[in-house]
Amino acid sequence: MQAELSRYAGGFWKGISALGYCILSNYYMGFLLCVFSVLYYLAARFGAEKRREGWWKSGLKFAGASVLGGGIAAVILIPAMFAVAQTTAAKEAGLSAPAVTYGSIWEQLGRLMLDSWPYATTADQSAVNLYCGCAAILFLALYLLNRKIRWQQRAALGGLLLFYFAGFHFSALNLLLHGLHKPVGMPNRFAFLFIFLLLKAAAEGWGKGMEMDARATAAGGAVSVLFCAAVGVNTGNMRTILATAGMLALYYSLFMEASSASVKKSGRKRIELLLAVLIFWEIGIHGIVGICHDGSANRNLYEISGKELKQMMSIKDTGQGYRTDIVNPVLRNEELLYQINGVSMFSSTNTDRMQAWMERMGFETGANRFQYAGGTEAADMLLGIKYLACRKDLQLQTPYRKTDSGNHFDLYENPRALADGYLTDSSMRSFRLTGDNPLEVQNHLLSAMGCGTLYRTKIIPALRGQPGADTVFEVDLKGGEHGYLWIGGVEPDEARIDGSLRKKGDWNNNFLDLGYSDADRTVRIELTDSRTEALLGICDETQLDQIYRKLAANELHLENGKGSMQASKDGILFFGAFYDAGIHVWVDGNEAETLNLDGMLGVPVSKGLHKVELRYEVPGLRLGAAVSVFCLLLWLAAAAPVFTGISRTAGTFSKHGGGKL
């Protein structure tokens, strides 16, 4: 990257500032670009026609410039390293399975073709957006076959293209090029670097293609069409052959006409202009059609329903310490989109502790995400979830009172939501999330808090000989009972509760909420796979009321991170927030010991009235800031002559030992 940055930014030292700026702008993309810069530098050195400096001197300059550019961005890099080390993505990072591949190479090559529509988001880890016009395929072939271009230069750029394409397919390489991150949701986000290299090669293939003889040009056209045919045959997609090959033939004929010696200069310019217009037309039409294709969002739906929910919430007393969650969102992070404080989160920065806590409590989780589905009345209480928004396509069976209803959402209020913090028993200090299922885990958690158990559990057998489903359970619930069903083993793909569908990935089909009713009822559960038994848990509403009153008697309400509480005994102040090393809690003016309660935050307090304050300091921020200041001063001292005009000979990348690809 510094190769291009230094060349186009106006000098070697300006290239360093550009590198630092890229990292500061986006840490994730900065990582991808830093890996790319090293590979590009090596390729540029290999392909350079003239090298004014040797490998060692040039390499040391490049390494020094890279370190200095990264050092300028250390105020972002170092805290990010501290944070990323705690994430689920970091725990999964590693080269333990280097032989694993993603999808089919031919299917991925097919993403270069005219009929490949863009992915907005997908669970297919092999998916990649590579289309950048059919002309890129033709002119890449001309570039690789053009003997007027040095073979070292063609080999270097062609090797980079192969290397990055291999990254789409081989998991170990994908992990490196993906910033040590699995390709979740939006796979192969480094594809823009492959496209940059492809377009660079294609641009030079067009620019220097006029110098090729007719035989070499014909070979380039034939190779591009044969490549298209091979992809079409191996993917079984004849439309690929017809559509893309047709465009290639059109572009090739125009290019050959422009290259003809009999065509005057003015005529050549007109043909080249026509070729450029056709290329832009093709890409433009593809973009317009593709933007509303696979996975694109319905902006109107989010905008209208979001306004409705915000309007509902604007008249509610949510307070700073309470949460609101959407039971059945149509988008990951929909709460964040509407600026609502909820527990759902789809982010690479989710820590391993957060993920584990939510999963053990019964919430729906996945790679780098957890969401409200799978929540219980007890979890709502402990996490301070005061309001539940439910889209109208689902009838929520809950004891919570419906407080509002609109065209898109029904809004329910939880009367037992606890505030920012509350006093629990001292035994919480050594608490660990134990239990084979969420019902046991929540019972153990409430017991450790000093509240006793909540759920009555029993094993129920599956019904035999039931048509229409692989497994059927029927559960009899009395009026006033809220039932939950735990189904162990592999999560069922689909579950139906009284006919209402729950799909894996949107719901936790291992832990089903059977709902609440004031009347006696029988709930029918249908699964798409075979099971013999399940664990039924019944929430005792009277016991839940008693637990709530006990915990609410010693609540902490925070405003701008400050509040006070009355502790009726010595114990652990439990916060409905995840533990983070950057959180510091001050009690009565003194910094208190922060406890990691198996993923949640707590501090010990003594009996009496206490003033509590929460402060947050980003781990690694001070060290990162110090390194950034030092590197910035060093850069200013060294680069001052270049910027002030004292030195008029600012070197380019080529001057500092690189070369042109």
Image (cartoon, rainbow, N blue to C red):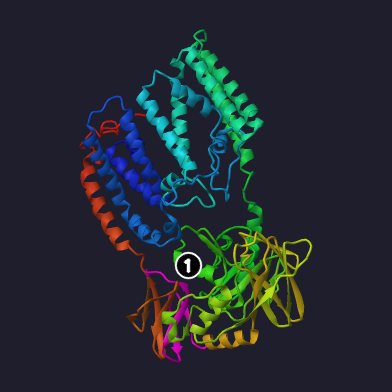
Q: Residue at x 60, y 84 (%)?
A: 544
Residue 38, x across and y down, in percent: 34, 40
561 in the magenta segment: yes
Q: Residue at x 31, y 27 (%)?
A: 48
Identify the image quadrant of residue 66.
top left
CA neighbours of label 1 inside 10 A, class few (<14), some (14 to 19), many (20+): many
Q: Is residue 120 left or right of residue 79?
A: right
Identify the image quadrant of residue 63.
top left
User: Could you tell me what secondary structure mostly forms the magenta stretch?
Assistant: strand
Q: Could you tell me which quadrant the N terminus lies in?
A: top left
The number of callouts visible is 1
Q: Residue at x 55, y 40 (%)?
A: 104
Q: Is residue 428 left or right of residue 21?
A: right
174 in the magenta segment: no
Which residue is farthest top? 262
Residue marked by disc 1 = 354
Q: Is residue 651 left or right of residue 557?
A: left
Per the image, label 1 sits on a secondary structure element best described as helix
Mark 1 residue type:
Met
Given residues 92 and 122, the one toward you in this image is 92
Residue 459, x across and y down, in percent: 65, 76
Residue 396, x across and y down, in percent: 70, 71
Does the image show residue 659? Answer: no
Q: Is residue 456 above or below residue 168?
A: below
Question: Where are the magenta residues, as a range?
Answer: 553-582
